[in-house]
Amino acid sequence: MPNDASLQQQTLAIGGMTCAACVSRVERRLSRLEGVKRAAVNLSTEEAVVEYEPGQVKMRDLRRAVEEAGYQVVEGGREQRQARRQDELRVQRRSLVAAALLALPLFFLEMGEMLGLPLPEVLMVEHHPLQVGWAQLILVLPVMGISWRIYAEGLRSLVRGGPNMFSLIAIGTLAALGFSLWGLWEVGTGRAHTFASYFPAVSTILVFMLLGRYLEARSKRRAGAAIQALMDLQPKMATLVEAGVERQIPAAQIEAGDLLRVRPGERVPADGEVVEGFSAVDESLLSGESLPVAKGPGDRVVGGSINKEGSLLFRARRVGRDTVLAQILRLVEEAQQGKAPIARLADVIAGYFVPGVMLLALVAGGAWLWAGTGIEFALEIFVSVLIIACPCSLGLATPAAILVGTGRGAQLGLLFKSPEALEAAHHLDTIVLDKTGTITEGRPVLTDIIPLGAVGEEEVLRWAAAVEQGSEHPLATAVVEVTKGRGLTLGQVAEFVAVPGRGASARVEGQVVVVGNPGFLAEAGAEVDAAALARAAALAEQGKTPVWVGVEGRVVGLLAFADVPRPASAAAIAQLKASGLQVVMLSGDHRQTAAAIARQVGIEEVHAEVQPAEKAEVVRNLQRRGGRVGMVGDGINDAPALAQAEVGIAIAAGADVAMEAADVVLMHNRLEDVALAIRLSQRVMRTIRQNLFWAFLYNTAGLPIAAGVLHLFGGPLLDPMLASMAMAFSSVSVVGNALRLRRFV
């Protein structure tokens, strides 16, 4: 997301990138444009996110910079690009099969004896070099033709001064081909009796390269499955109702205010409000709850949810990019497009790695040639160094893990807005929880009904509810809800009067009933005695709000209300503490109430009576103490604190401002998901470190072996074909390790 409101953000789909060196090159070209403030390129999603000054940079400038770097901007939306990638995957599979069928005879000719399959003399290049050499050449040229993209992209990048993975392969295989052609020419002209043929090695290297690219593309497609799953929740068609007539229209054409029909089994095509009908709707994509939610006139429905039973007619309120599902999709896309700080290490290294490898290959090959080993040996060293060092795995190490991790988070209802947030979450050591709506339900609940005198509990409740049914106060709503739940009937009400801050009164079935504080009851002639006041004080110590009920000048009962903790809050907080996190509660309520809630859920450090503007200062103080703070809240007054914290975590049911200020959004409104989000962050970062370790290991440990260091001490050489196998395996293993995050729970 842009940090400066004046900046414009553009996402470009980039074609032709193959490794971390490509990423580094595109980023440098885009960043050099005057007016571009930031450019982040992601190899896994094959996209670049550019932030720039609108008046200084145009889209054609960005496109030209990408093309000058040796790549191209791919047109179309995500769906079109996904379809193109699927088509490309099929082409890659066909190319791989064709190349493998052509390379198999060559591989057999080269490795048959080593595999225990003795060759007839007629197939041995030592005995029939000209005939066997021509046969090998006829088989290897089609394999090279099938792999033409490797040569086109590799040589083009080399000419433009930004060599990449394909450049290493192209140089190595062309050098081997040229050496073999020279040997074949020598035999054909009678100057030599035999020659060293690298034709089989060239074909095998290219086949393994094609195999690695195919497996990598397939793995990346699987890594992006979460985005595709979210996209699949959006129905393609909708039933529009106009003047009583129903007709099918594309969902993209829905406008706010349209009347839409959703039948059983269909997905809701937009966010809206039910006008007619009753049904049960599966909203598990938002709530995480598997049980369908009853819907009727006036209820809200969310696009992407599934209508289970009856037919619903609803009016669209939010459509297209404004729907909840579209916002979720956008958040996940933005997180996957960005770049975690740890990824920059790989990018910096990759920018120097490929040129360094080319220099090392020349030096190693030249050194062995100078040592008198002969050109054949030196060429083998040169080719092996180029091929083993392909930095593809290095470029995929971080983005593959972020892609899978953020996608899995979205499936679990954890929306990370950026890779920076994903990385920062695993460093947290302090979690600050807003009380109201985060730890508690966020609304008052009737907790105690205490009769005073000869009347019963239900009678006190009926009198209070009869008066309060005419009030919109939250405490009145809580009383009426309990009455409805018990199935109590309320008496006839007249002369209702509400006095803000004091209470309400009415005539109920001919009797004057007063509900409110002691002073309000005293004005109506109902005095509260000392014993009753003591009981009210005891309730207040528990964090409850006492309300009195009087009938015809006498006190008949006491009601107590509290914003009670969510059922899972105590367990969620215990889970956070078990993870080694310090948990702090923040509340604007008075200290007695806040302390009572804190005791119930197991929190020791409480900051109470904190004004909205002071919440961010509390977070700052915790940071000054050395804490890396995550703030969890749901209200508008939490927004400054969410922005101040290292990681702001918003409850999705809260205010839009809070979600905008936060770095992570918990879509299922569960406090226990805070611990889940932190664990996911830790798992993703562990996976990234594992990937970087293996990528560096492949590319550093393999280089001295390929350069012949072991051979100096009597050890083996690294055959170019084995080098190509190791290179392909490194990329696949890195993506495969990232894919394990799909099983995170």
Image (cartoon, rainbow, N blue to C red):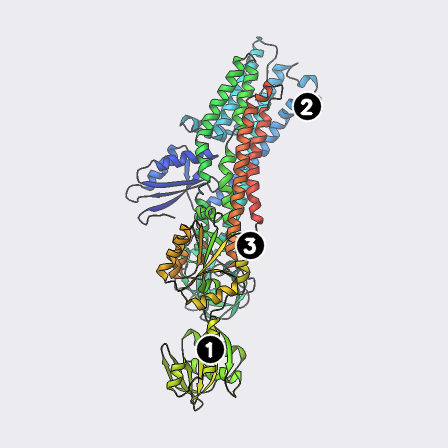
User: In the current view of this chain or complex, which residue is farthest to the left?
Assistant: 55
x 53%, y 85%: residue: 456
- Tell how many labels: 3
Secondary-structure class at tag 1:
helix
Separation of residues labelled 2 and 1 (CA atoms): 92 Å
Separation of residues labelled 3 and 2 (CA atoms): 57 Å
Against 168, residue 237 (above or below) is below
Q: Which residue is mark 1?
A: 536
- Does residue 738 appear in the picture of this structure? yes
Q: Position of residue 704 (x, y in %)?
A: 55, 24
| Mark number displayed over residue 578 | 3
- Does residue 250 appear in the picture of this structure? no
x 54%, y 14%: residue: 375
Q: Amino acid at mark 2?
A: Met
Secondary-structure class at tag 3:
helix
Q: Which residue is mark 2?
A: 114
Q: Position of residue 718 (x, y in %)?
A: 59, 24
Separation of residues labelled 1 and 3 (CA atoms): 37 Å
Q: Position of residue 282 (x, y in %)?
A: 53, 63
Residue 364 in the figure: left or right of residue 132: left
Dots 3, 2 in contact, CB < 8 A = no
Q: Amino acid at mark 1?
A: Ala
User: In the current view of this chain or complex, which residue is farthest to the bottom?
Assistant: 510
Mark 2 vs mark 1: which is more N-terminal? 2
